[in-house]
Amino acid sequence: DTAVSQTPKYLVTQMGNDKSIKCEQNLGHDTMYWYKQDSKKFLKIMFSYNNKELIINETVPNRFSPKSPDKAHLNLHINSLELGDSAVYFCASSYWTSADNEQFFGPGTRLTVL
Amino acid sequence: GDSVTQMEGPVTLSEEAFLTINCTYTATGYPSLFWYVQYPGEGLQLLLKATKADDKGSNKGFEATYRKETTSFHLEKGSVQVSDSAVYFCALSDLGNTPLVFGKGTRLSVIA
């Protein structure tokens, strides 16, 4: 029944490692997003995809590489993790043609880089 | 660019007190406006939304009215409960499919 799911929920890793976060939605949406929430709770868009095509890349370091194998999935791979990458990463989805762009969020992945 | 400004927290209230969290925005177009809530340890949930001027969004006793003349979307609740303790985010979406622009969040603590 989960609408937008993310795995893992928690991720603790060492600096320099490479890690991936996965997101899946079963709402039939065609647009998906990654947001980053920093330690002060500030939320900022990182990427958005529509029908597997990258639409927005908000000046995110190229160590971050999103991939959308199909409309229902959006993954985020992070190379050479740095301390500053510690944050909560939220996936969201919506309809591209939605009149109000209401977005549905996953539960978040808390990434801690040691 | 588009931006959202909401009142700094934290806000601490006693149960049954009246709540107002101020939110103002700047946008180039005619945005949709949202309030999202994040309960401790959880993800974001949509609380309410409004898509045009003078629309009132409401849910779980919370209300907010889209005021185009003052570019505001203040969140109100007449009588808060301990279970309302959370972080509240005001957000906008300008144009149909652009990412949400969020305010910095306001942490609300309600004490019994």
Image: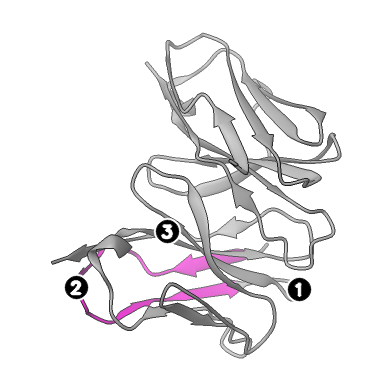
In terms of sequence position, does the residue under pointer 1 or pointer 2 come before the other? 2
- Whole-Å distance between the Cαs marked 3 and 1? 23 Å
Marking on residue B29 = 1
Q: Amino acid under label 2?
A: Glu
Q: Which residue is mark 3?
A: B105
Question: Which numbered disc, 3 or 2, marks the residue that appears first in the sequence?
Answer: 2
Q: The C terminus of chain A is located in which quarter?
A: top left
Residue B37: give x, y in percent of width and height.
45, 59
The chain under label 3 reads: B
Camera-nearest residue between B81 and A36? B81
Q: Quadrant of residue B54?
A: bottom right
Q: What whole-number distance in Å separates the C-alpha atoms at marks 3 and 2?
A: 21 Å
> Quick check: is B20 in the magenta stretch?
yes
Q: How far across and down, in percent of the image, does residue B32 sit?
A: 68, 71
Farthest front residue in view: A1
- Of badges 3 and 2, the one in the foreground is 2
What residue is rendered at 73% in x and 67% in y? A100
- The disc at residue B15 is 2
B26 with respect to B28 (left or right)? left
Does residue A23 appear to the left or right of B29 in the view shown? left
Q: Secondary structure at mark 1?
A: loop
The quarter in which the N terminus of chain A is drawn is top right
Do tags 3 and 2 sit on the same chain? yes
Respond whether the residues carrying marks 1 and 2 are from the same subunit.
yes
Q: Secondary structure at mark 2?
A: loop
Query: For the residue marked with disc 3, what is the amino acid?
Result: Gly
Residue A3 image offset from top left, x and y in percent: 62, 44
Magenta stretch, main secondary structure, is strand
Decide: marks 3, 1 in contact (CB < 8 A)? no
